[in-house]
Image (cartoon, helix red, strand yellow):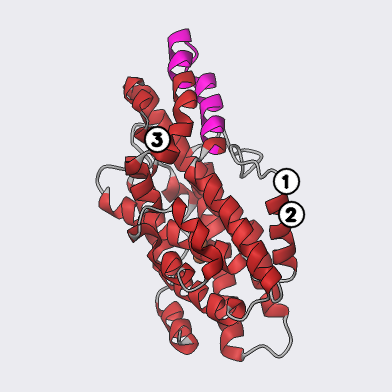
Amino acid sequence: MIDQTQLNQVSNSKSFEVPHPEALKASRFERWSPDSIAPWTYLPAYQNLTDDMKLRYNQLHACTVNELFIWFEQKILLPILTRLIAQPNQDPEFKTACEIFYKEEVKHSEMFRRLSKASASELYKKTDFYFFNSRLSISRWLMEISLKFPQTMSTWCWILIFFEERTLMYSKEYLKAKGQVSSVYSKVHHLHMIEEARHVQLDKYFIEKMYTGASDLNRRITAYILGKVLESFSSPKRMSKAIAKRMKLEFVRPEEHDMIDQISLELPMLKDNLDFKLQFFGFKSNEGTLNLMSQYPEFDHLKKYFLL
Ligand SMILES: [Fe+2]
Ligand SMILES: [Fe+2]
């Protein structure tokens, strides 16, 4: 069982301030992301790109990660935490944990927002989301219901742990690539990791508290939505297509467009690429999520998305 009091104390001792925008200007001559978390690097056509194109793809990919984190924190996490905090007769330790969680996610979003604006101001003058477009689908609609009724429809617990464990994996890859990627991006992901490690503990607690004993309908909907989320992450086409579109604006020669088109054609191959799967869907990257999923038979059919 997770100890709330202990987690709250750790939070107070391990906290950080959002860096000033001036300190977040990453150099255009450096890579902003480890290759290991950049999907195109797993495709054969990636090797045909020029060095300039590889560098720019790397930077734009890092921008999409910023966007994804801001979106997740603002659109999924904060609405849930707001509702949990507002619930009457809440256990005070649990409420404090949610309040700390909330404050930290607000801070993280601000940090990634500043990072985007400082390092790629031309993309983020008017928006936080240049690449990201959250399409309304049936699974999205069901997820909205889960966000509105977090007590009775606790699907969100699973989205949280899957996603937050993934942010930890990203931070660890930044640590491994230290010295080979922008020190600005490395620092931001390191700061993020300090608080995310505890969030994953809290996510486990949410599952214990909110999902154990869930209704049959809740379980079936959760398995369906989680399947949709895993499917979209197993073949990340939408962000890649948005990056390809931007790359074509920056690299205008016909042969450069051909190279980018070739990448787009190869994107479906990611789903079956073993190295990609090992990085993103291997046991090490998803240990907490997988250990918990194995306790619930409704997720058995989702094992096919992982490399176990
Ligand atoms: Fe965060
Ligand atoms: Fe978090």
Spatial CA distance of label 1 from label 3 is 28 Å
Marks 1 and 2: in contact by CB < 8 Å? Answer: yes
Which is more foreground, mark 1 or mark 3? 1
Comparing 291 with 170, the one in front is 291
Q: Residue at x 37, y 38 (%)?
A: 273
Which residues fall within the magenta stretch?
A: 239-260
Image quarter hosting the N terminus: bottom left
Q: Which residue is mark 1?
A: 136
Quarter where residue 77 is shown:
bottom right
Whether residue 184 is visible: no
Q: Amino acid at mark 3?
A: Asn
Q: Earlier in the sequence, mark 3 or mark 2?
A: 3
State the image coordinates of residue 73 (x, y, percent, origin top left).
58, 59
State the image coordinates of residue 80 (x, y, percent, origin top left).
66, 68
Q: Amino acid at mark 2?
A: Trp
Q: Main secondary structure of the magenta part?
A: helix
Q: Earlier in the sequence, mark 1 or mark 3?
A: 3
Whether ligand 2 has any atom under 8 Å from the Cβ at mark 2 is answered as: no
Q: Which residue is mark 2?
A: 141
Q: Is residue 203 magenta?
A: no
User: Does residue 151 appear left or right of residue 292 in this picture?
Assistant: right
Spatial CA distance of label 2 from label 1 is 7 Å
